[in-house]
């Protein structure tokens, strides 16, 4: 290796680069020690849980643990082989063990995730497994004809290893067909993709309304004298300091059919008493309440950017002959873009993952994908919840990447 | 003092007053006429009202009272973008998201000019400030001086008849500032535009202007060509604000047509020219430029009064010697002598006699 800078040495003959490294290493060590606690905290509370979640979205040993013999049979016989008596014998032996270990429910639940209605099948068969005699194939099928179903066997094959992509299939609305292969579910059973799309559309609407509301306020904040802008800033930040639950509840009070807004509208004669608007427990409620909750996240980045734009730019544009609209469009707006971008990204990402507000005011119509994730967590289907969360994470990362390509992350300005 | 605006003035302020709070006036009854092609500088300390005047002319502030006319047309109600006035700002205000070319093209675009014509004009304006090679740069990639030139080119590119400059050289270092002063001066001469220039730097004002309006306390203290301003200040403020100045407090002892004798508070008699004093017995402040004070007896005009001085400090400044003296009880009296061959270097503690020609000492209003 040739060192082009080898000519440079310190006065006592050490290479300059080495001397520089030595001089800086202490400062670097100190800097590292200073951030080490936070780094550790982030690894423990952020990186590890996310890694664990991603793992859970692929891993589920509910069936593979309790059916070792069948798993061994599947391992010996590649996909597509005929399900022989050997497979049934292994299954019956496993069912007997399950009954002894009280795990048929657990195994059935795992298969149930991809082929609904199988929990009882497993429980019933396990109860009688001890009494079954060869040939096991006929014996089991005699017990319940479903044991011959190809899709059940396909589901068991895929569940016989701890890791599978089954939950991602379910998360994108796929179902095992009768032959056992994956296909799109029936129209009325497709819920997740619809929810993903709705989540993104609602988040986009919320982001847009935040932007429209925040832009004038941020401009006012940035141009008012300090004393007045501080007061206004407190009003803007008030939502931050109020409990989320209190804020959401007050929206219910305001927006419900017998609520303040409807009463005022009726009193003003704008709507009839029988025509009261439904503004809560639906998408409208979710949009209104979440716009309010997330507004500060839009105002603050916008404000911090607008604060740095000297009024002389607008004056210069005016003196050069631009009308106030042209000045705004050509001179002011482009300079606020980093703030708009930062605020929109922040609000959008927060909105996509928002849970409490839609749960409280969304009704059936205003639910977002995170409510579905929460639903599956409550029902202990951790793997499906994790798969849905992982898809959400990837979608956001893709957005982030697109954003970086289009706008550039270095142009973000959060405040 | 008041200047009656001529009816043919290009820019005219007539009895203009401005108040921001309704309690105090920032600009008090301003009357000012600026001729076509003139380079007029508004000079004054901060808060003197000069920038407010400029902003009223540009249309960013409204006059509380009075009329402002541009080319004979009252412009009080005309919005800034219809005034057609070029303006150079203190921090240049180049649009950071546009290239140099786009910045210059902006005023032409909003006037609906076609692309080929725009390009020609932009190129011509850039060449005028020797920045043709920088058309595709962004302002952030330029040095302060280069940004200054672009700002200048942008203010001129749409051929305004009037260009306003608000302390445009304030952010530059001394050398560049002096260079740019000459460049702006030359542009003014070659383009024949009218320039109203605001600064608090008296050197800048004296170097560039046809006339200087010295502002203080919302009023024009004196409006005169640079040489008059320096050599014939009409009141104590102007004398003190423009250039270095020695002040002696006293009372008029004897009053003549072109000469008066002033008895200083410490008892000595000195010669002066009456400028802003009412007559015998009036309190006055006599102002003398440090370079007009003579300490060699052979150089003093015959019959001049001299007073005693003691050398306190001698500073060698290269081309000049600056000597601080104790005169009439004050230790702040300064004289400047040129570093010519054989010039005497005074030593601290030395006792000398100083004097001056009566026309160099001006008896002004007491402060």
Image: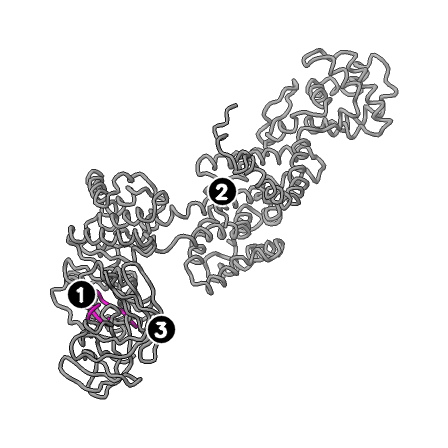
Farthest residue, direction front: B342
Q: Are marks 1 and 2 on the same chain?
A: no
> At x 47% / y 52%, what residue is drawn?
A304
Pinpoint residue A221: horizontal percent, then vertical percent.
45, 58
Residue B2 falls within the magenta-colored stretch: no
Q: Report the mark closest to the observer, 3 or 1.
A: 3
Residue B195 at least partly seen: yes
> At x 69% / y 38%, what residue is drawn?
A377
Looking at the rendered structure, which numbered label has been put on residue B349? 3
Q: Are marks 3 and 1 on the same chain?
A: yes
How far apart are the two marked residues, 3 and 1, measured between alpha carbons? 40 Å
Per the image, the residue denoted by label 2 is A204
Q: Is residue B49 left or right of residue A29?
A: left
Would you call the spot at circle 3 few (<14 residues within 10 Å), some (14-19), or many (20 or more)? few
Pinpoint residue A320: horizontal percent, then vertical percent.
26, 51
Q: Is residue A254 left or right of residue B244?
A: right
Stretch of the chain drawn in magenta: B212-231
Q: Is residue A243 left or right of residue B168?
A: right
Residue B157, compared with residue B273, is above or below; it is above
Q: Report the mark closest to the observer, 2 or 3.
A: 3
Per the image, the residue denoted by label 1 is B225
Pinpoint residue A283: horizontal percent, then vertical percent.
54, 45
Residue A278 at least partly seen: no
């Amino acid at each position: 290796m040739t060192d082009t800078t080898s000519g440079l040495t310190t006065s006592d003959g050490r290479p300059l680069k080495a001397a520089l490294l030595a001089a800086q290493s202490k400062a670097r060590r100190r800097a590292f020690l200073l951030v080490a606690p936070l780094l550790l905290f982030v690894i423990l509370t952020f990186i590890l849980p996310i890694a664990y979640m991603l793992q859970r979205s692929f891993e589920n040993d509910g069936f593979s643990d309790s059916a070792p013999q069948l798993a061994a049979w599947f391992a010996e016989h590649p996909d597509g082989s005929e399900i022989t008596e050997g497979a049934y014998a292994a299954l019956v032996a496993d069912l007997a063990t399950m009954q002894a270990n009280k795990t048929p429910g657990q195994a059935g639940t795992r298969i149930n995730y991809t082929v609904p209605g199988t929990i009882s099948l497993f429980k019933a068969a396990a109860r009688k497994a001890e009494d079954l005699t060869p040939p096991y194939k006929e014996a089991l099928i005699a017990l319940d004809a479903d044991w011959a179903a190809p899709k059940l066997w396909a589901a068991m094959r895929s569940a016989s290893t701890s890791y599978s992509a089954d939950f991602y299939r379910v998360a994108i609305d796929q179902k095992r067909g009768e032959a056992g292969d994956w296909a799109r579910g029936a129209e009325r059973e497709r819920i997740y993709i619809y929810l993903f799309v709705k989540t993104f559309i609602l988040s986009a609407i919320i982001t847009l309304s935040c932007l429209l509301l925040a832009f004038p306020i941020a401009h006012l904040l940035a141009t008012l004298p300090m004393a007045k802008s501080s007061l206004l800033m407190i009003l803007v930040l008030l939502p931050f300091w109020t409990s989320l639950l209190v804020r959401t509840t007050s929206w219910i009070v305001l927006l419900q059919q017998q609520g303040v807004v409807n009463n005022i509208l009726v009193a003003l004669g704008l709507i009839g008493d029988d025509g009261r608007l439904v503004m809560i427990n639906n998408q409208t409620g979710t949009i209104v309440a979440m716009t309010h909750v997330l507004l500060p996240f839009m105002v603050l980045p916008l404000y911090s950017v607008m604060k740095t734009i000297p009024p002389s730019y607008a004056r210069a544009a005016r003196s050069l002959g631009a009308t106030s609209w042209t000045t705004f469009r050509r001179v002011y707006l482009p300079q606020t873009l980093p703030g708009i971008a930062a605020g929109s990204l922040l609000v959008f990402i927060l909105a996509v993952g928002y849970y409490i507000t839609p749960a409280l005011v969304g009704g059936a119509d205003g639910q977002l994908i995170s409510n579905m994730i929460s639903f599956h967590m409550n029902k202990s289907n951790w793997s499906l919840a994790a798969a849905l969360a992982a898809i959400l994470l990837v979608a956001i990362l893709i957005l982030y990447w697109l954003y970086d390509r289009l706008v550039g992350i270095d142009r973000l300005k959060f405040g | 003092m008041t200047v009656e605006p001529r009816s043919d003035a290009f820019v005219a302020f007539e009895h203009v007053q401005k108040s921001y709070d309704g309690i105090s006036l920032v600009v008090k009854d301003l009357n000012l006429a600026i001729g076509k092609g003139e380079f007029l500088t508004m000079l004054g300390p901060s808060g003197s009202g000069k920038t407010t005047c400029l902003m009223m002319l540009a249309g960013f502030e409204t006059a509380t009272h009075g009329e402002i006319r541009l080319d004979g047309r009252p412009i009080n109600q005309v919005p800034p973008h219809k005034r057609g006035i070029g303006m150079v700002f203190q921090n240049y205000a180049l649009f950071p998201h546009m290239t140099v070319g786009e910045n210059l093209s902006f005023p032409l675009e909003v006037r609906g000019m076609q692309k080929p014509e725009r390009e020609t004009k932009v190129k011509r304006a850039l060449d005028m400030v020797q920045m043709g090679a920088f058309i595709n740069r962004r302002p952030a990639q330029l040095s302060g001086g280069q940004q200054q030139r672009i700002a200048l080119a942008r203010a001129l590119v749409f051929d305004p008849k009037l260009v306003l400059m608000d302390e445009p050289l304030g952010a530059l270092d001394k050398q560049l500032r002096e260079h740019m002063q000459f460049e702006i001066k030359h542009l003014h001469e070659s383009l024949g535009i009218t320039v109203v220039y605001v600064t608090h730097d008296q050197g800048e004002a004296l170097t560039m202007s046809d006339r200087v309006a010295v502002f203080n306390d919302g009023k024009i203290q004196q409006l005169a060509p640079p040489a008059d301003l320096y050599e014939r200040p009409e009141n104590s403020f102007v004398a003190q604000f423009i250039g270095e100045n020695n002040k002696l407090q006293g009372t008029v002892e004897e009053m003549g047509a072109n000469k008066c004798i002033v008895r200083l508070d410490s008892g000595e008699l000195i010669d002066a020219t009456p400028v802003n004093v009412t007559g015998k017995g009036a309190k006055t402040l006599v102002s003398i430029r440090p370079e007009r004070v003579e300490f060699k007896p052979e150089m003093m005009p015959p019959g001049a009064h001299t007073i005693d001085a003691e050398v306190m400090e001698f500073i060698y400044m290269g081309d000049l010697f600056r000597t601080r003296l104790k005169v009439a009880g004050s230790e702040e009296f300064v004289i400047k002598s040129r570093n010519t061959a054989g010039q005497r270097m005074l030593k601290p503690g030395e006792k000398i006699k100083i004097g001056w020609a009566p026309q160099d000492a001006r008896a002004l209003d007491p402060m």
